[in-house]
Amino acid sequence: MPYARTPDGVRIAYQLRGAGDPLVLLAGQANSHRWWDGVREDFHVARSTLTLDYRGTGGSDEATDPVGTRDFAADVIAVLDELGIERADVYGTSMGGRVAQWVAALHPRRVRTLVLGCTSPGGRYGVERGEDVVRSLAHPDPARARRALLETMYTPAWLAAHPGPFRTLGDPGMSALARRRHLAASRRHDAWDALPGIRSPTLVLHGGDDVLNPTANAPLLAGRVPGARLELIPGARHAYFEEFRALAGPLVLDFLDGAARRT
């Protein structure tokens, strides 16, 4: 398994697939690159895909210190440097969208185009999930808590037709400490003041029925990033990129191709 080494000595596992201009795919909180399994191939008609395992997930080293979304963004840059990739398209979903915000804001020359999926600006302006959702996800019965998470990810019809396995429920190999640090990183994220400085053409994509990361965050992001385009997928929940892949994948590719033609 190939690794990049960060300036502080952490090994970050990465996975490069396909051929063509690179598209960096950033997973959600407490997930490895497996988040994108079964979906990343949709992009190989036009691009290669580059994923990585966050600190504490997959093949990467354990996070020995507290981490934030800026730290994860720096790890993305370390992987790009290892591969000699000067510029890439970046597509982040959920916490990966938070990380992608920092990659684009802090390293504008490295990001050709940006896609922010089912994510939030965080901080004082980010719209938090409702208390009913919080309670259901924290249910003391693990089976009920897992079912509640599944129901925020997918529609009932999709769940009835797809018994699993599910790739979006977290990396089963993570330590409890790493999970807590990922959760803290997501909760502390606040890129509001940095968003107007993003210069990459940006698509904000969100499920219309997302309650895990409420849909109201999408217009906030689109209004804060200069020139951003907003697309909502009606009826979709948090894992829109998987359940609605036949719609979401082409939307992303069309945006990337259109932005490339204009630049």
Image (tube, grey):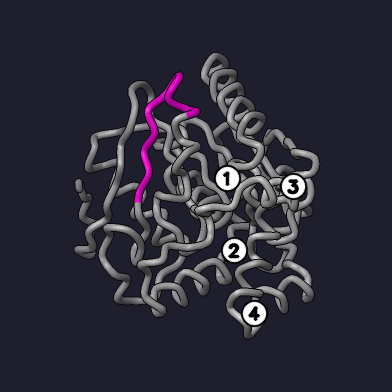
**Going 66% across and 74% down the picture, which residue do you hit?**
144
Q: Residue 190 carries which label?
A: 2
Above or below, comparing residue 203 to residue 220 in the picture: above
Q: Amino acid type of disc 3?
A: Ala
Q: Does the residue at mark 1 contact the one at mark 2 (Cβ under 8 Å)?
A: no
Identify the secondary structure beneath mark 2.
loop
Q: Disc 4 marks which residue?
A: 138
Above or below, comparing residue 182 to residue 231 in the picture: below
Q: Residue 197 carries which label?
A: 1
The CA distance from mark 2 to mark 4 is: 24 Å
Q: Residue 97: horizontal and vertical position, in percent?
A: 55, 50
Q: In the displayed structure, does residue 145 sit left or right of residue 110?
A: right
Q: Amino acid type of disc 2?
A: Asp
The residue segment tinted magenta is: 42-52
Q: Residue 251: horizontal and vertical position, in percent?
A: 64, 27
Which quadrant would residue 127 be assigned to in this image?
bottom right
Above or below, comparing residue 231 to residue 147 in the picture: above
Q: In the displayed structure, does residue 157 sit left or right of residue 164?
A: right
Identify the secondary structure beneath mark 3.
helix
Q: Disc 3 marks which residue?
A: 157
Q: Does the residue at mark 2 contact the one at mark 3 (Cβ under 8 Å)?
A: no
Identify the secondary structure beneath mark 4.
loop
Q: Dot 1: within a 10 Å radius of its alpha carbon, few (fewer than 14), some, or many (20 or more) residues?
A: some
